[in-house]
Image (cartoon, rainbow, N blue to C red):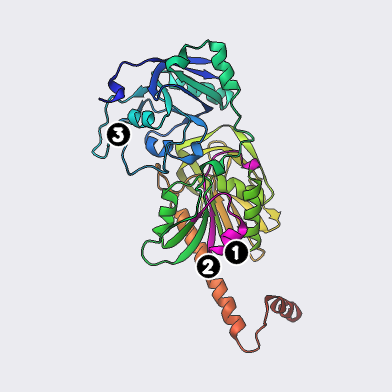
Amino acid sequence: MSSALHTREPAVLVLEDGRTFTGQAYGHRGEAVGEAVFCTAMTGYQETLTDPSYHRQVVVMTSPHVGNTGWNDEDDESSRIWVSGFVVRDPSLRPSSWRSRRTLEDELDAQGVVGICDIDTRALTRHLRERGAMRVGIFSGDDARMPSDQLLERVTSAPLMEGSALAQEVSTDATYVVEAVGERRFTVAAVDLGIKSMTPHQMAERGIEVHVLPASATADDIRAVQPDGVFFSNGPGDPSTADHEVGVLREVLSASIPFFGICFGNQLLGRALGFGTYKLKYGHRGVNQPVMDRTTGKVEVTAHNHGFAVDAPLDADTDTDFGTARVSHVCLNDDVVEGLELRSAAGDLTAFSVQYHPEAAAGPHDAAYLFDRFIDLLTERRGQREDTSEERARPGAPTSATEGTVNRKVGA
């Protein structure tokens, strides 16, 4: 019988500012400590729990009823649950889906994820919106009976999210390949900073052979793939700590290799272009965030999971070491930068990124076109290379890129 039908034990949630919520144990019994964040999604909890971007975070679900579709074997976005803890108001007693193989609570218990239920998640969410994301602890079983001052000490001794380098903790240990569906059109090197399985799947469906590399990959590792383009994934942690990844990305941009990044990859592109990053008060998490694509004027409802953002001017282009950068997408709730694009001196798009999740697992599909935009960029760059090769093959053509540049300047 599912543990959801058993008599529950008391549990307590303690925030670092001392506020406490009492409820009942949910999932595994014990202690969980991390950063308290809230997710506004009404569905897709399985994809949320298995998203590596939630590493070291305790997720509060604002939707009051959670667990009604159970847990299946198809929708995981990685090999395990990554959240540190899970908070719900009203857990479903039993799943109601033909795809379900077990209950949500049984899966949480099996993977050692401590949770709490039967608390006022609306009050907790309002508290986090007013005070900001903060450290939190969930305690059940014997841990819940400890004195309150000792529980608070455990919370405040946990590391802060600011200054935390977490991408390499969730990244793959070894390179693997996701084969293109049908004819292979392009090869892409995807740096795994916490990648979700749906992301390379979306690229593979468009004819891309995806080589997924560890976060520790070097520029030489990327070049060894001989990629048509490079992709940086989503991931957890503070982007200000990712100096290695930013250095690699600057080499990619210097080599004029087409680049596409999402979420953490967007923040790292911002840093590579010379922008700063900063911690949001409580972040954007859920599948209902409105974003405007400033290139088309289209408003998208998008899936988000980020607590940091890029500090770039919204209404001015910026000259960088690699071309002209501008903000391409903006959040309509709070004007947070939601995308960047980089153009060469000739005006050609060379790199772009978004702060949200176009793979939409779970979430709306409004932003799936971004994978097609990447395909367009790869196609355009291949055409430019072929035109250059044909030009050099003509009798009397310049024998090097340098000679061609000199000749064009002389003839101008």
Disc 2 marks a residue whose amino acid type is Glu
Q: Residue furthest left?
A: 98
Question: Earlier along the polypeptide chain: callout 3 or callout 1?
Answer: 3
Question: Earlier along the polypeptide chain: callout 1 or callout 2?
Answer: 1
Residue extent of the magenta highlight: 212-241
Q: Nearer the viewer, mark 3 or mark 2?
A: 3
In front of the other: 96 or 81 = 81
For the point 23% across and 38% down, the residue is 98
Q: Residue furthest right?
A: 410
Above-or-below relation of 165 to 269? above
Instruction: Answer whether residue 368 is visible to the viewer in this image.
Output: yes
Quadrant of the frame with the C terminus: bottom right
Distance from disc 3 to disc 1, alpha carbons, whole Å, reads 46 Å
Total marks placed: 3
Magenta includes 327?
no
Above-or-below relation of 64 to 304? above
Q: Which residue is mark 1?
A: 348
